[in-house]
Image (spheres, rainbow, N blue to C red):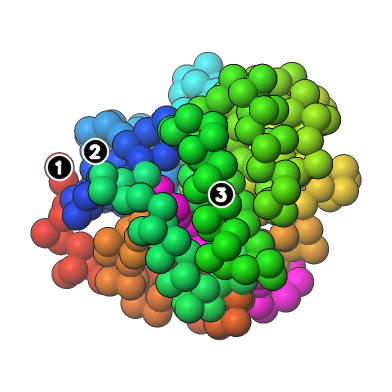
């Protein structure tokens, strides 16, 4: 089997209203698809790259660079291909290039599982076929007050969520605590509540916030500070009873090794679309297992459902609904659904990502 071509496609669509988290405002949604074609006409790998907030030319030219030595190689040789792509002196140790490597690597695993005619989670370990899931949302929006936040949480519970996450860090601490309080009232005592600051706090602010939030029974407090501030994260972890989670801005097994070695967090949140693909993700899984740490991947439910289902230390799956992505339910054939707080792993061969190309086409950017 041989790789014959690699294509990069980027799509962008507007949000009805910008959404804001602790540090960033999003006016649009982005989707970067990597297609790896093979000499088996019926087997094409579909991967997704972590979003690049830059011109699609950047993604395309990085793919072109990799294509020079990937065309003609067996797509099943993912270890060799990863090593070939990840030459730190040429492509850098982290950042955009690693996001493209991730997209290509995910497509390779799609090929592998399609060839084996089994779903990816079975190929990777098949620990379970059903995983606990949380709905992530609770963003700041213009005109969205406590009442609207309350209604959003009620809606999440009606959709079957047994766990929900909201954003914090963009408002004064005491106002955010009010937001946390209203969410706990909306969801009741039995639904898990997570808080995500998206790196907005200094470590001493995060400690103050965590202490004030403790009485609302918080399942985890995510990315309180800058991702490289391992020591700050460790101080927060040691000063609150709330578990601390992070990892969506971490790259490769080396980044997670450092996060773990600093005893910085309680829960690891790798994103296979960002940190190096599935080849690298599974190495982080093993590293986490050898430290008795759980994995709760960041975003991209369509890919991460397989990874959480495959492993013994998969804690919970993040799920974005239409509040985060206005095209939710319209992009992929076979969208994942939450039932009774859980998502069922797809039983189709491969990852099961089938883009609706015609729907996406008007949003293609060049
Ligand atoms: Mg987050």
Q: Give me the residue at 60% from left, 75% from top.
A: 341
Secondary-structure class at tag 1: loop
Magenta range is 125-139
Image quarter (top left, top right, bottom left or bottom right) of the C terminus: top left
> Residue 185 versus residue 129: which sits nearer the camera?
185
Q: Give me the residue at 53% from left, 78% from top.
A: 160
The reply to whether the magenta stretch includes residue 130 is yes
Give percent across and percent down for residue 336.
Answer: 47, 75
> Residue 59 versus residue 67: which sits nearer the camera?
59
Q: Give me the residue at 61% from left, 76% from top.
A: 342
Give percent across and percent down for residue 359.
Answer: 18, 68
**Which residue carries the number 3 mark?**
180
> Residue 225 versus residue 329: which sits nearer the camera?
225
Count of numbered circles in the view: 3
**Which residue carries the number 1 mark?**
366
Q: Locate residue 254 relative to residue 143 in the image: left or right.
A: right
Secondary-structure class at tag 3: helix
Packing grade of label 3 (10 A; few <14, some 14-19, many >=20) is: many
Q: Give me the residue at 62% from left, 68% from top.
A: 188
**Which residue carries the number 2 mark?**
56
Asked if residue 323 is positioned above or below residue 172 in the image, the reply reads: below
Q: Are marks 2 and 1 in contact (CB under 8 Å)?
A: yes
- 3D distance between C-alphas at marks 2 and 1: 6 Å
Mark with earlier residue (1, 3): 3
Asked if residue 183 is positioned above or below residue 27 in the image, the reply reads: below
Q: Are marks 1 and 3 in contact (CB under 8 Å)?
A: no
């Amino acid at each position: 089997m041989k790789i014959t071509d690699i294509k990069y496609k980027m799509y962008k669509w507007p949000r009805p209203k910008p959404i804001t988290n602790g540090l960033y405002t999003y006016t649009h949604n982005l989707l970067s698809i990597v297609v790896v074609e093979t000499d088996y006409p019926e087997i094409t790998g579909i991967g997704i790259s972590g979003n690049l907030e830059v011109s699609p030319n950047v993604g395309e030219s990085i793919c072109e660079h990799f294509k020079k030595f990937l065309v003609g190689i067996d797509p099943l040789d993912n270890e060799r291909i990863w090593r070939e792509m990840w030459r730190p002196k040429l492509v850098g140790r982290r950042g955009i290039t690693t996001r493209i490597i991730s997209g290509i690597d995910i497509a390779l695993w799609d090929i592998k599982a399609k060839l084996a005619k089994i779903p990816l989670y079975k190929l990777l370990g098949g620990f379970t076929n059903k995983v606990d899931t949380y709905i992530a949302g609770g963003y700041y929006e213009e005109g969205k007050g406590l009442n609207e936040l309350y209604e959003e949480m009620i809606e999440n519970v009606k959709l079957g969520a047994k766990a929900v996450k909201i954003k914090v860090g963009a408002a004064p601490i005491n106002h955010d605590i009010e937001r946390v309080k209203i969410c706990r009232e909306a969801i009741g005592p039995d639904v898990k509540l997570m808080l995500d600051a998206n790196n907005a706090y200094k470590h001493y602010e995060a400690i103050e916030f965590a202490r004030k939030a403790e009485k609302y029974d918080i399942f985890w407090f995510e990315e309180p500070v800058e991702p490289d501030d391992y020591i700050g994260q460790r101080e927060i972890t040691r000063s609150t009873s709330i578990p601390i989670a992070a990892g969506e801005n971490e790259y490769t097994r080396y980044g997670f090794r450092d996060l773990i070695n600093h005893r910085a967090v309680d829960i690891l949140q790798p994103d296979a679309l960002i940190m190096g693909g599935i080849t690298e993700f599974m190495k982080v899984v093993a590293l986490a297992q050898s430290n008795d740490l759980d994995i709760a991947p960041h975003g991209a439910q369509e890919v991460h459902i397989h990874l959480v289902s495959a492993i013994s230390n998969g804690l919970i799956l993040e799920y974005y609904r239409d509040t985060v992505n206005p095209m939710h339910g319209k992009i992929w054939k076979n969208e994942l659904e939450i039932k009774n707080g859980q998502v069922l792993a797809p039983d189709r061969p491969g990852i099961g990502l089938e883009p609706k190309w015609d729907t996406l086409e008007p949003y293609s950017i060049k």
